[in-house]
Image (cartoon, rainbow, N blue to C red):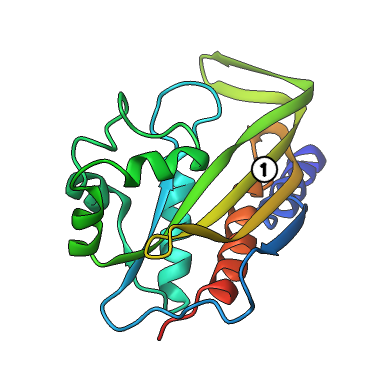
């Protein structure tokens, strides 16, 4: 009876926590005067990440998060998928730029500027970076038998999210600013019959920090 009561207290105590602690650092750099040209009615921004498959490809979930956060801050956003379709085939994985430094070559392609203007995209936000597990410790073991199934142990994972957003004014064809964010945290997984994760939401913290700074850098008209 005492063991069952102890188990209930552990489950309720850990279950009351949904996430682990996360620390983050966000920096903004402006390469244009503070009065960055505001968006005029009808103009939008687009969030793009590296399109080639492989290492250092930014997660689609981060792009989606950033689009949603910018929209909630009253910035008009053209979805990445819609913009990629509008510029077909220049943003397909086999032809898309590998970095923001290659964007001028993209803009020099015949017809690209006309399609961008037709899509009413004024600012392109190029995202580079990723979230990754950098260390882990502990162990969990699970077993099943007639009338019983459960896990026992404790695991932890250090996670790091490191992203940079480079903002291009597509009319003026130059960088107006950069925002970088680095968030770190540790996910804990205690298990006494039932594994209950305390997740370090580093990607969400980095997304929030970058979105806040981008909204400060780019203002709707």
Which residue is at the front of the view, 105 or 215? Answer: 105
Q: Residues within 10 Å of mark 1 (few under 14, many from 20)?
A: many
Q: Is residue 137 visible?
A: yes
**Residue lying at 70% horizontally and 55% vertically, measured from the top left:** 17
Quick check: 192 above or below 104? above
Which residue of the protein is positioned furthest toward the bottom in this rendering? Answer: 221
User: Which residue matches tag 1?
Assistant: 162
**22 or 13: nearer the eye?**
22
Q: Position of residue 82 (x, y in %)?
A: 22, 52
Q: Where's residue 87, x and y in %?
A: 21, 45
Q: Position of residue 72 (x, y in %)?
A: 44, 74
Question: Where, by quadrant of the figure, is residue 27 drawn?
Answer: bottom right
| The C terminus sits in image quarter | bottom left
Q: Nearer the viewer, residue 117 or 45?
A: 117
Say above or below: 186 vs 63. Answer: above
- The image quadrant that residue 50 belongs to is top left
Q: Is residue 79 left or right of residue 17?
A: left
Res. 49 visible in picture? no
Residue at screen point 55% across, 29% down: 56
**Mark 1: secondary structure:** strand
Q: Is residue 10 left or right of residue 176?
A: right
Residue situated in front as seen by the camera: 170 or 147: 170
- The picture places residue 142, in percent across and down from the top left corner, at 63, 18
At 32% across and 51% down in the image, what residue appears?
Answer: 80
Quarter of the rendering occupied by the N terminus: top right
Residue at 38% in and 39% down: 105
């Amino acid at each position: 009876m005492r063991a069952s009561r102890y188990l209930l207290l552990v489950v309720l105590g850990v279950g009351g926590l949904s996430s682990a602690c996360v620390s983050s650092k966000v920096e903004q750099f402006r390469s244009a005067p503070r009065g960055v040209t505001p968006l005029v009615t009808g103009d939008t921004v687009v969030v793009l990440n590296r399109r080639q498959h492989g290492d250092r490809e930014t997660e689609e979930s981060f792009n989606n998060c950033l689009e949603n956060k910018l929209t909630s801050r009253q910035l008009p956003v053209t979805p990445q998928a819609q913009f990629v379709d509008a510029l077909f085939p220049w943003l397909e994985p086999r032809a898309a730029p590998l970095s923001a430094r290659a964007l001028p070559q993209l803009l020099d392609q015949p017809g690209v500027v006309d399609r961008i203007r037709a899509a009413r995209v004024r600012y392109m936000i190029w995202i580079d970076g990723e979230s990754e597990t950098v260390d882990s410790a502990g162990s969990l073991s699970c077993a099943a038998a007639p009338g019983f199934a459960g896990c026992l142990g404790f695991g932890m994972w250090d996670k790091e999210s490191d992203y940079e957003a480079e903002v291009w004014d597509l009319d003026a064809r130059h960088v107006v600013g950069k925002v970088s964010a680095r968030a770190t945290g540790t996910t804990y997984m205690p298990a006494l019959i039932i594994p209950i994760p305390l997740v370090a939401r580093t990607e969400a913290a980095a997304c929030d920090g970058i979105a806040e700074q981008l909204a400060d850098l780019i203002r709707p008209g």
